[in-house]
Amino acid sequence: MANADIGIDLGTSNIVITMGKRGVILNEPSVIAYNTYTERVLAVGKEAYKMIGRNPDYISVVHPISEGVISDDDLARSMIREFILKVAGYQLIKPRIIICIPSYITDVESRAAADAARSAGARQVYMIQEPVSAAIGAGINIADAKGNLVVDIGGGTTNVAIVSMNGIVASHTIKIAGNCIDRAIIRYIQNRYRLLIGERTAEYLKIHLANLYDPNVEISIPVKGRNLLRGLPETINLNEVELYNAIEDEVFAILEAIRKVLGDTPPELVGDIHANGIILTGGGALLGGLCPLIKRTLGIDCRIADDPMNCVAKGTCVAFNETDKLLDGFENVPVYKYR
């Protein structure tokens, strides 16, 4: 693989970029800040993320990728271009780029992603579906005639797929993932305590307080916000049981998506999955107690992939060595084909 080749996991919450043999070289929030008067980009990634909730009216801080797909073409192009320049600079030879896309994406949405990469200076653009890339990044040999169930829980979507013989046998995508869980936490605290908190506080609670298998009422975290009735700052204590109640519906929607894919899977592959277990990737895989909850609910062993946050992006590094099996361009979205 040439050192100039770039792999991009274009996530709703984070963008992860790999480059050649160097592996993952960038992992930053997929956020862009720009001046609404001059339309000039002010910051991307971590610097833009710091501005959320603190920006004046003339500075807009947005996520140009919503629920796994590009929602604002111009801002997405600018953001991708800035990230590529950050990691590769100005090169004489333009890089090849692989972009990970959700398995349900439409032709129009895939074309927008490919156009964004081309406008950022790509020589060639390849597309690979996220579950396939996640399976490769988790160290699974997807060429084998064995079924592997991959659950990729990102920021905007959860992709559930059965991967076998270089292809996806059955898949299902739901728009319930990390961001949706954050909103559920905000809504619960607002309804129960009349306290308004921000997205960053909700994400902190999700990471540090979630216990989906055996929540304990004795374990709690102080939460600061604005009282909606008095309009003044206030602090409450939120415990694990309350957080479980806040996100229970979203978590079980993910379990139902797994159950649906298993229901659409041929019996022989279901036997493979029962033997191999379920592989969790993405940031949502780190939710406390999710693995034992899946095992208790579905009766199938479950494990978290090594480095789940970067698993999809790492798969692109390996995929560049298999370009003879990839379809060049964006005309056909299911880019992996069985040879």
Image (cartoon, rainbow, N blue to C red):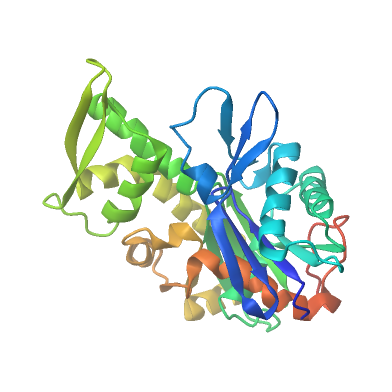
For the C terminus, give its image quadrant: bottom right
User: Which residue lies at the image location 41% right of the left edge and 63% below the top edge?
Assistant: 298
Residue at 56 percent of width and 69 percent of height:
311
Residue 104: horizontal and vertical position, in percent? 69, 51
Task: Residue 146: name its quadrant.
Answer: bottom right
Left or right of 38? Residue 125 is right
Q: Nearer the viewer, residue 194 or 246?
A: 194
**In the picture provided, is 319 more to the left or to the right than 210?**
right
- 310 in relation to 205, above or below: below
Q: Nearer the viewer, residue 73 or 171?
A: 73
Task: Using the rendered image of the protein, determine whether residue 260 is visible from the camera's viewpoint.
Answer: no
Q: Is residue 241 left or right of residue 84?
A: left
In this view, which residue lies farthest toward the left? 218
Spot occupied by residue 273 in the image (x, y as percentages of width and height): 53, 75
The vertical placement of 91 against 2, above or below, is above
* Quadrant of the frame with the N terminus: bottom right
The residue nearer to you, when weighing 179 against 171, is 179
The foreground one among 291 and 320 is 320
Asked if residue 242 can be seen in this view, the reply is yes
- Residue 103, position as x, y percentages in the image: 69, 56
How far across and down, in percent of the image, does residue 269 sit? Answer: 60, 74
Q: Quadrant of residue 199?
A: top left
Q: Residue at x 70, y 27 (%)?
A: 38
For the image, the number of numbered tags is 0
